[in-house]
Image (tube, helix red, strand yellow):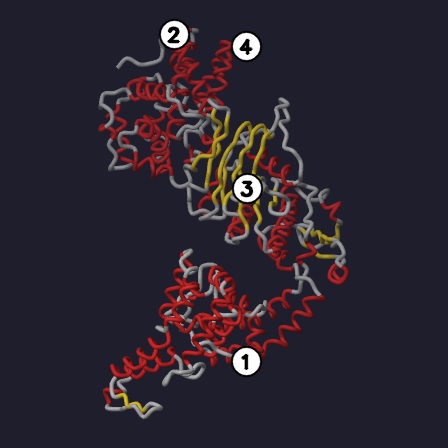
Amino acid sequence: MKSLNVNLENCYGITKLKYDFQFNNKNTYLIYASNGLMKTSFTKTIDAIINGRQPEEELFGLTPNYSVQDENGNSINDQNTFVVKSYDESYSSKNVSTLLMNETLKQEYDKVTKEIIDAKNEFVNKIDISFPKGSNFESEFNRVFETENMLETLEKLVDNGVGTSYPIDFSKIGYGDLFNDKVKEFVDKNSKELIEYKNEYESLIGNCKYYSRGVFSQYNADNIGESLKENGFFDAGHKILLNDNKELVSADEYYELFENEKKKVFGDAKLLRKFAKIDKSLSKNTQLRNFRKIIENNLELILDIVPFSLFERNCWNKIINNNLEDVKKLIEKYKNSKNDIKHLQEEANKQNENWENVIRIFTERFHVPFSVSIGNQEDVILHNSVPIFEFTYSDKLQINTAIVERSKLNSVLSGGEKRALYLMNVIFELEALKKEGKEYLIVCDDIAESFDYKNKHAIVEYLYENSQYNNFKFIILTHNFDFYRTIASRLLSYDRNHSLMARFNYDDNSIYLDKGKYQRNVFDYWHQNYNGNNAIILALIPFMRNIIEYTKSNIDTDYLKLTSLLHYKIDNSSKTNNIKMNELNTIMKKVWCDIDILTTYNEDDCVYNKIIDEAKSISSTQDNGTLDLERKIVLSMACRLLGEKIIIEKLLDNGVLSSDISSITKNQTGELVKLYEDRFGTNNDFYKIVRQITLLTSENIHLNSFMYEPLIDTSPNELKSLFGQLITIGDDNNIINETV
């Protein structure tokens, strides 16, 4: 599978989703989707399709439309797709029996066969022939000699004699130009004319002084001439005495003599007419034109090309003879190993593959209070019976043990242990699928859900190893952003084309998969790209505040000043509306000495006003369901500041003392809400907005402990809606911007 085209509409919770997954460069796609967006619906849709069920739209009765096909238009099915659900308590691998083979036996077999394979590869690599794309020495040998076992056939050739060899030189003649379907078709169609040409040639060659058909040909003469010249035969004063006592004392004389002989034969008018009949068919396509060029330079080749299959084999006999010593060495190694291979194959027929490797994968990596064995292993091996698992359960002190049936095991395991048991069965299935050797699409729905960090890491490593297996194509879905980043790093090396983030576009009621964001250090990205970006500059405020808190203290003056930009303060010592951009710039320079925000803002600008103005700009921008992290942070900051300001104004108007408000030193939003509840109660419209502020602008959103993951899940539309409501209330009460 090179690609997977997904087109879904009204499939469970998916309204519309189109995406073309391309597996050319990597075997894995990673999708982050917030809860309720598309993750489980996608998995349920795939599961329904491969099990022959129609996906459903469960709420509104809408008609589902779906297509999930590979690059050839083939739909996925249960023979090429495996769905790993987040958790399925009742799931048990169906293919455990295929894993029951003796590992030692397999290792011995692999060792013996590897020696032969290595020797064969070493031999093949020595053959200096360029084979056409899609073929190689072994595939061509097997085709020509009509065999499935090259080594076995080579052994017979060596033992019985290689046979007639045609003098061919593939360093000068392209293998694919000589042996292809078009040339074979030509020879078969023109066999009569080719035989007539051969007969005429035989007649002519019989009258030649120096050529002798089957003894001394043009090819032989050319080879000898080249050899004599290269080795300085004539330069050393040597002579050649021919059968008519004629002497040749130079290379020029040699070439002239045999060239004239060649012309007498191949220049014969009758022979030329016969060739002309053949030649008419040699210009039909590129392959035949290449073949014609070969004939022009090797005229005698055409004499032996009928029948074509015999000609091919004779040419291969020449290849083998040219490398006969290496062939003999290879066959000797093959003979020495044949008996061992035969014995191991017989043993393999008696046993299935040992499954202990799979158990080892699980027990070495995942921590559960039970061990697993097969209670009827002999029957499974000998009679292909369904395996019966035995689970040996141990207490925490490893003192008491008990054998527990699979059906009863769930009642004694914790939630995490049940998930581990489920994962063990998934591992069984994946390892069994590997043994099939077929391509499989593996769809994983939050496979790490509810695992502790140690087991999550084990899952990541197992997924990584399987992602290197070329026959597996993975689509991994998760709503856990930490897991998403880990997979993006370990499996995909932060390839944003394969690590995607799902978003819902309200304009066309569709789900889109965008390139992933925030996989690495987002704070470093902000540091590098803050200049001229208002949103990043303002989003740095809570980040800088954290750095100061951890490097100095939460009573540091700079820390308190930045706090006044996250909570609306009215006391004179830290009044929010008094903080100017030059003050913010000074603080930021202390933390990051190379930062200068005054290239973007004026030094006398009120920071609070700029936060509100930037939030207005963000709210008015069409974003198609997505919003950068820094812009979400600015919106959140604006919502909290404006919300607190409105609450404070309402409290002051209702008789609350400013000193009571100024005395709040921690958890200001929560304390203000309590004061609001005491004065106004909870049964009013503004209180609903107040509760939204506490929910959507939590301390995690403001990067406390450098955590920004919760904000990834926050809908930009929720933030925009909340800010819009606060703006309306602020406008009505004339309490939005500060006068500087």
The residues tagged by marks 1 and 2 sit, at their Cα atoms, a distance apart of: 102 Å
Residue 621 appears in the rendering: yes
Tag 2 or tag 3, which sits nearer the N-term?
3
Tag 2 or tag 1, which sits nearer the N-term?
1
Please state which of the two labelled residues, at mark 4 or mark 1, is closer to the viewer: 1
Residue 230 appears in the rendering: no
Q: Which residue is mark 2?
A: 733
Please state which of the two labelled residues, at mark 1 or mark 2, is closer to the viewer: 1
Q: Which residue is mark 1?
A: 158
How many residues crowd around disc 2 within 10 Å: few (fewer than 14), some, or many (20 or more)? few
The amino acid on which the numbered mark 1 sits, given as a three-letter code, is Val
Q: Secondary structure at mark 3?
A: loop
Say left or right for 160 vs 299: right
Q: Which residue is mark 4?
A: 683
The residues tagged by marks 3 and 4 sit, at their Cα atoms, a distance apart of: 59 Å
Q: Which residue is mark 3?
A: 73
Tag 3 or tag 1, which sits nearer the N-term?
3
The amino acid on which the numbered mark 2 sits, given as a three-letter code, is Asn
Extreme residue toward the bottom, this view = 245
How many residues crowd around disc 1 within 10 Å: few (fewer than 14), some, or many (20 or more)? some
Tag 1 or tag 4, which sits nearer the N-term?
1
The residues tagged by marks 3 and 2 sit, at their Cα atoms, a distance apart of: 62 Å
Residue 448: image x %, image y %? 56, 42
Q: Are marks 1 and 2 in contact (CB under 8 Å)?
A: no
The residues tagged by marks 4 and 2 sit, at their Cα atoms, a distance apart of: 20 Å
The amino acid on which the numbered mark 4 sits, given as a three-letter code, is Asn
Residue 252: image x %, image y %? 25, 81
Say left or right for 170 vs 119: left
